[in-house]
C-alpha cells in the first residue's frame, strides 16, 4: 500500500485543520459499530429497565446522538458539521452477554462523518458502562470500528 501524505500536518509538521473549502459538497454517510460485554445478570437488568439509573438503552441512544453532534468539540482537528441524520441502534445479545451498538451519520457536505459515527458508538458504550457500573465493573467495551463509509473523493469503504 502506498503511503499517503498526512493532511493534518503542515509542511513543518505542525497540526492543522484541513482546508475543505474547495471540495464539492456531496452526500456522505458513515456507519460504525462497537460492543459492550457484561455479565448475563447485568444484561438482564439493562434490557429489563431495572437499573437504578433508569432506561440505559434509551439514555445511551441519546448520548450517542449528542456525541456525534459534539465531535468537533472533542476531536481537535474535526470540522463542525451540519449533520442531517444520526441513528444509534442498540442490539442486546443474550448468547454473548453483550450489546452491539451501531451508529450511522449522514450529511451533504465537504468532509466525511466517520469520526462522528465512531464517537457516537464510543459514547453510547461509555454511557451503558456508566449506567451499569454499580452492578458490574468488569464490563468491556470492544471492537469499535468503521464498517461503512460512502461519499467524497475516496468513495466507498466497507469494513467488517
Image (tube, rainbow, N blue to C red):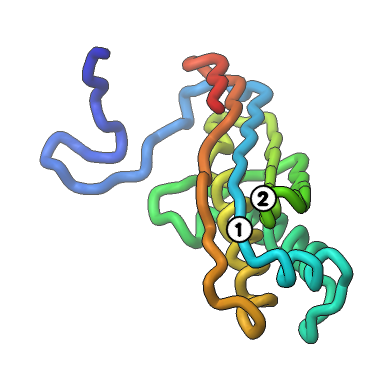
Q: Check the image and report above or below for 26 versus 91.
A: above
Which residue is painted at 64% across and 21% down in the image?
26
Q: Is label 2 in contact with label 1 (beta carbons under 8 Å)? A: yes
Relative image position of residue 93 (x, y in whole percent): 75, 49
Of all residues shown, which one is farthest toward the right? 48
Relative image position of residue 99 (x, y in whole percent): 70, 54
Q: Which residue is mark 2?
A: 96
Q: Which image quarter is the C terminus in?
A: top right
Of all residues shown, which one is farthest toward the left? 12
Q: Nearer the viewer, residue 136 or 75?
A: 136
Which residue is painted at 14% across and 42% down in the image?
13
Which residue is painted at 73% across and 63% down in the image?
60
* Viewer can see residue 90: no
| Element at label 2 | loop
Q: Give how far apart the Cα atoms at labels 2 and 1 are.
A: 7 Å
Q: Nearer the viewer, residue 46 or 74?
A: 46
Kindly indicate the quadrant of the structure image that contains residue 98. Answer: bottom right
Q: Which residue is mark 1?
A: 37
Amino acid at each position: 500500500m502506498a503511503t499517503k501524505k498526512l493532511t493534518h500536518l503542515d509542511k513543518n509538521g505542525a497540526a492543522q485543520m484541513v482546508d475543505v473549502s474547495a471540495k464539492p459538497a456531496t452526500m456522505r454517510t458513515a456507519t460504525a459499530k462497537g460492543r459492550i460485554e457484561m455479565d448475563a445478570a447485568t444484561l438482564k437488568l439493562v434490557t429489563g429497565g431495572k437499573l437504578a439509573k433508569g432506561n440505559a438503552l434509551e439514555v445511551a441512544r441519546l448520548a450517542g446522538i449528542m456525541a456525534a453532534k459534539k465531535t468537533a468539540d472533542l476531536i481537535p482537528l474535526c470540522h463542525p458539521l451540519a449533520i442531517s441524520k444520526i441513528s444509534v441502534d442498540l442490539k442486546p445479545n443474550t448468547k454473548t452477554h453483550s450489546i452491539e451498538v451501531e451508529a450511522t451519520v449522514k450529511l451533504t457536505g465537504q468532509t466525511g462523518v466517520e469520526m462522528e459515527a465512531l464517537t457516537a458508538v464510543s459514547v453510547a458504550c461509555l454511557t451503558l458502562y456508566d449506567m451499569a457500573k454499580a452492578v458490574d465493573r468488569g464490563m468491556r467495551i470492544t471492537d469499535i470500528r468503521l464498517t461503512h463509509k460512502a461519499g467524497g473523493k475516496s468513495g466507498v469503504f466497507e469494513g467488517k
